[in-house]
Amino acid sequence: MERSVWQRVPVREVPPEERRYDFREVNLGYTYEDAIVEASRCIFCRRPFCVEACPFHQDVVGYLERIKEGDFVGAMQVILRDNPLPAVCGRVCPHPCETVCPRGRKGDPIAIAWLKRAAADYAPDVQFPEPAPPTGFRVAIVGAGPAGLTAAWYLRLQGHSVTVYDAMDEPGGMLHFGIPTFRLPREAWHQDLERLKALDIEWRMGVKLGEHVTLEELQQQYDAVLIAIGALKQRWMNIPGEDLEGVWHVIDFVKAVNLGNAPDLKGKKVAVIGGGFSAIDAVRMAIRLGADAFILYRRDRAQMPAAQEEVKHAEEEGVTIHFLVNPTRFIGENGRLVAIEVQRQQLGEPDESGRPRPVPIPGSEFIMPADVVVEAISQEVDLSVLPEPLRGRRVIAVNSENLQTSIPGVFAAGDAVTGPWDVPNAIASGRKAAQAIHAWLMERKRVTV
Ligand SMILES: Cc1cc2nc3c(=O)[nH]c(=O)nc-3n(C[C@H](O)[C@H](O)[C@H](O)COP(=O)(O)OP(=O)(O)OC[C@H]3O[C@@H](n4cnc5c(N)ncnc54)[C@H](O)[C@@H]3O)c2cc1C
């Protein structure tokens, strides 16, 4: 049967019954031909809402036009003008661009993210343009997640010399130790990393700010410093029983699984608390490790922050989601978790996030058996590694116009400034900070010449 232009070309996926047992990538991407057919559904709006909706204003129209012509190299060249992480974004971006696509009013929006991935799949060797001649300025970037890497890319292309520091042994931040390989395989992310490595950036891995090096030392050695340390500090629910064996925070859990130290979950009952990206990833990891895993979420399906597609994938793989429930205490025996006391909730007035507030129903508590629990409610910024003037309320304090802190020449970007958010916003923030650093350095040159 012929597909109408309102229908999206489906993407190939590993079937749930096969994929729930391993960490292979689930989404297999478009074939070359399917990508061209899907790009040809675009009506190439004169005022492209997709570009406006993208946090860093990716030129979507430009790359879809080229894919439509079968020019995947041209598409990659367009993408790489705005975005140093196309293979990553084509897989994990929550694609706000698709929500506003006019095709979506009557049918399926264009698969903008999958088409970015197709460009990365079929033109992986396209490189960035040559950097500008050396400026003589040296910039230190602390944190090699998407925000820090984006800033490194932009500043390097302007001709500055860039050194990236990270506490971990490998760059990537959440791309390395957070997002699971069944959504972002190492080879895909390394495709973007290799392109960045070709830019002659200096990498100082295994160096932690506040432990191995201080901000003052960096200020002495560099002309400007960018802090992009993410929001990796664990935020707990603060309920009784969190000290029991078997209770994890999501960052520790995903790190352990991604870095090859997964706990033995075979046959165990695993409860994951939360409704965002990290909760869905943790529960799908637990399923793959042989657990009977389920989600406890205090609001309803419509309020889940995770992408609907990820929720669908989790349910196909056998995850049960319990809505409108919230844990009130963890119950142990001999120091080990055995059950969770859970209270039913109902939806009330909207809270500061705009979503209906979960309101506990008194007397509705019940007990659910569990061997392991993973709290995935939130994270915060570790401000303890920074000097006092940089410590804002929960995040690094910056001037929102240029992301400069109150210390001249010290800037901050990414989750460390916004609180936990997402990859496209980290990219946008990294680029904004880099543009401000570039302007600041150029200003100094003008004054000192
Ligand atoms: C499990 C999980 C799944 C996610 N899935 C998605 C998704 O599908 N799509 C999406 O858009 N977003 C997703 N996110 C969110 C996204 O990963 C983050 O918003 C993004 O990585 C933030 O980028 P960043 O560069 O600000 O920080 P990070 O990626 O957190 O990187 C910060 C870096 O700073 C380093 N660092 C920290 N402290 C120090 C220090 N003192 N000294 C030196 N280095 C330091 C860390 O080692 C790390 O490498 C997910 C998050 C999690 C936890």
Image (tube, rainbow, N blue to C red):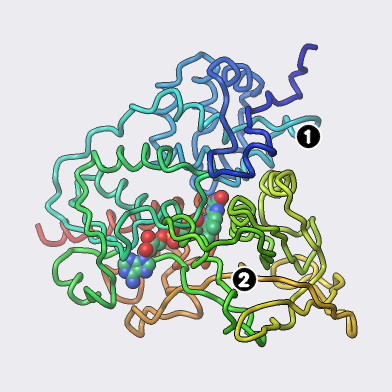
Question: On the rendered structure, is 196 left or right of 221?
Answer: right
Residue 383 location (% of width, % of height): 41, 78
Determine whether the residue tagged by mark 2 lies in a helix, strand or loop: strand
Give the mark, 1 or 2, whose residue is nearer the N terminus: 1
Question: Of discs 1 and 2, which sits in the foreground?
Answer: 2
Residue 276 % position (x, y): 64, 59
Q: Using the rendered view, name the quadrant where residue 300 is placed.
A: bottom right
Q: Is mark 1 on a helix, strand or loop?
A: helix
* On screen, residue 183 above or below 353: above
* Residue 442 in view here: no
Left or right placement of residue 250 versus residue 396 in this view: right
The quadrant of the rendering that contains the C terminus is bottom left
Please tell me in which quarter of the rendered image ligand 1 is found: bottom left
Q: Mark 1 points at which residue?
A: 105
Towards the viewer: 152 or 297: 297
Number of other residues with Cα within 10 Å of mark 2, as a class: few under 14, some 14 to 19, many 20 or more:
many
Q: Is residue 427 visible?
A: yes
Percent coordinates x, y for residue 69 in the rendering: 51, 14
Q: Which residue lies furthest to the left in this view?
A: 449
Per the image, the residue denoted by label 2 is 375
In this picture, residue 447 sits left or right of residue 118: left
Numbered tag placed on residue 86 in the rendering = none
Residue 173 image offset from top left, x and y in percent: 40, 57
